[in-house]
Image (cartoon, helix red, strand yellow):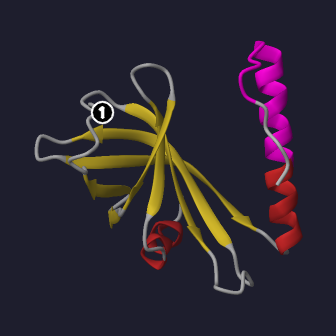
Amino acid sequence: MSDKVILEVKEYSYCVLSFIDERGYPFSIPLTFQRKGKTLVAEKPRSLIHDFAEPQRAHAIFHSVNEDFSNPRQILFKGQITETKEGELVFKIESFSRGWVTRRDATDEFIRDAKKRAQRYLDQKGITWYKITEY
């Protein structure tokens, strides 16, 4: 991975860190990471009680968009996250991907399709207590 990709982190105000919690559920939290060599480092929020003593798979997505939605972009890092004794979260990057949305309709389409995919998943699992409706 090039240093140029890591340097892009400073162009974003924050990211969303996602991982699987101890109960097996996806968990996401916004964090402000700083670049430190080939890793990303953030202060662990006091509200985050999850223990990262052992390395854990995680994703960190940085997303940015202009007010008029003319320049949306994102970068997704995949890797391992651990916690230091000092309370820092250290994210070791293993891979990354970029994304640009070229038009607003594409985002709306993606959201509608995501609702359909989520409903199919609920249907496959036999979960009938929740029905996703179009907006």
Q: Which residues are magenta?
A: 113-130
Q: Which element is circle 1 on?
A: loop
Above or below: residue 65 compared with residue 117: below
Looking at the rendering, in which quadrant would you find the C terminus?
A: bottom right
Q: Quadrant of residue 65?
A: bottom right
Coordinates of residue 79 in the picture (x, y in percent) = 48, 42
Coordinates of residue 83 in the picture (x, y in percent) = 24, 40
> Which residue is at 58% across, 55% downward?
76
Coordinates of residue 21 in the picture (x, y in percent) = 42, 28
Q: Tell me: 57 left or right of 75.
A: left
Q: Tell me: 9 left or right of 32.
A: right
Magenta segment: does it hold 116? yes
Residue lying at the far top of the rendered structure = 126
Q: Quadrant of residue 40?
A: bottom left
Q: Which class describes the residues within 10 Å of circle 1: few (<14), some (14-19), or many (20+)? A: few
Above or below: residue 86 compared with residue 117: below
User: How would you classify the magenta stretch by its main secondary structure?
Assistant: helix
Amino acid type of the residue tagged 1 in the rendering: His
> Which residue is at 83% across, 43% downward?
133
> Which residue is at 35% across, 64% downward?
32
Residue receiving disc 1? 50
Above or below: residue 135 compared with residue 14: above
Magenta segment: does it hold 120? yes
Residue lying at the far left of the rendered structure = 86
Q: Tell me: 23 left or right of 78.
A: left
Above or below: residue 51 compared with residue 68: above
Looking at the rendering, in which quadrant would you find the N terminus?
A: bottom right
Q: Tell me: 96 left or right of 36.
A: right
The total of numbered circles placed on residues is 1
> Which residue is at 42% across, 75% downward?
10
Coordinates of residue 100 in the picture (x, y in percent) = 74, 69
